[in-house]
Image (spheres, grey):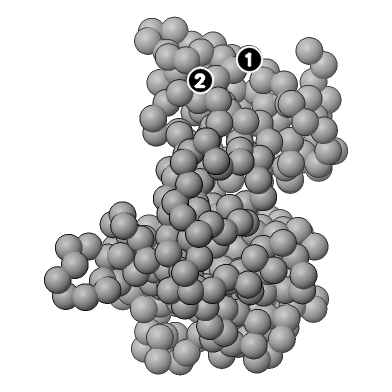
Amino acid sequence: MKRTPLADQIQKIDIIEHVTEDHYRELLAISRVYLNSETETVNFIDLFEEGMLLTIQYGDQQKTDLIPFLATGEIHHKVRHLAMTAIERSSDSQSQAKHQFFDVLHNQMITKNICRLTLKSSQPLPIDKPGYAWNFSLTTFDHIPDMAELKINEQRRYYTLRQAKKSSATVAFNDIAFVDVFLHGNTPGSVWSRNLQQGDIIHSAGDYNEKTDHLEQGNTVLIADETSLPTVAWLLENWKNPLPPTVISITHQIEDQDYLNNSQLPENSQIHHLHYSNCADNLLQILETIPQIDSVWGAFEHHAAKIIRQYLRTQRKLDARQNRVKGYWIE
């Protein structure tokens, strides 16, 4: 098979690091579906326009092969499509979608453009998992449907758990979830979230949990826009590092800066409020004023995240485990 190098080698490094560090489950599913079902470990070796080069280990054998993409388009889209297809086809119980249903109890605006969904679950909710998100189907039900009623290819969006708690002292586990959603125009996710009301039943086809353990020591920086502020809010309220963080909050409208309350910040924390315009340039200016940066977590617009990730890699010498900056959306 032809192997055409990517024109943007920095993007290649970003994708390989991101998939390896944050999506190993999906990487393992790809190798088990398309190379060998007995794969024990997998290494993402290289990336070409035509596919992903993986090395797998199974038993005492090792194999390196190129797995062709199934879709066309931008390279990140082709990688994501291959991963999603592998997950759907995988028979590995760890890779199967975790279907979950929620009752909508309340829907309220907490800033000008961020709404809070109060949901009730019959399954235990996470206790200490900042950056935990569900892959919600953009539909509603008036009853819990059979699996056969669920559409495999329906539109979905990831939305982040802001907080979980018990509905009463007698409940054995956290069953109430607060999920905060950024509403922006008439996008499918915004329309769905805006129209949810008490009594609706909604469905999640999977979940994802950000990795944030690297923030527990050293000088840290948190960067978030409206889509990732719920993760930062949880981190700040449960801060485990003896050193306070530097926080950079990015919003399109100044009214949404109210999302992070000063009372949430650990003592001596620094917070910078940025408008979305010229996001990457303004972020770089702030980062260059910080003498020591040991670890970063951030999630915001894809192209800006790419610039910041490269700066942290080349200028601050952060490896992939300490440089967890990613794009949550593309302008």
- Residue 120 lies, with reference to residue 136, above or below; the image says below
Quadrant of the drawing holding the C terminus: bottom right
Q: Which residue type carries mark 2?
A: Arg
**Disc with the residue nearer the chain's start (1 vs 2):** 2
| Residue that sits furthest to the front in the current view | 142
- Could you say whether the residue bearing mark 1 is in a helix, strand or loop? strand
Name the one closer to the observer, 4 or 313: 4
Q: Residues within 10 Å of mark 1 (few under 14, many from 20)?
A: some
Q: Is residue 296 visible?
A: no
Q: What amino acid is at disc 1?
A: Asp
Q: Are marks 1 and 2 in contact (CB under 8 Å)?
A: no
Q: Indicate whether 197 appears above or below 258.
A: above
Residue found at x 73% / y 26%: 69
Picture coordinates of residue 323, whole percent (x, y): 54, 56
Residue 320 in view (yes/no):
yes
Residue 127 horizontal side relative to residue 46, left or right: left
Compare residues 152 and 85 and report the one nearer the observer.
Answer: 152
Q: Residue, x 77% and y 39% (percent of image)?
A: 75
Q: Which residue is mark 2?
A: 32
230 to the left or right of 11: left
Q: Position of residue 149 (x, y in %)?
A: 55, 41
Q: Residues within 10 Å of mark 2 (few under 14, many from 20)?
A: many
The foreground one among 188 and 90 is 188
Q: Is residue 198 above or below residue 253?
A: above
Quadrant in which the N terminus appears:
top right
Residue 166 placement (x, y as % from top left): 26, 71
Q: Secondary structure at mark 2?
A: helix
> Image quarter for residue 188?
bottom right
Q: Residue at x 47, y 15 (%)?
A: 37
Label 1 vs label 2: CA separation? Answer: 12 Å
Q: Which mark is residue 65?
A: 1
Point out the residue furthest to the top here. Answer: 61
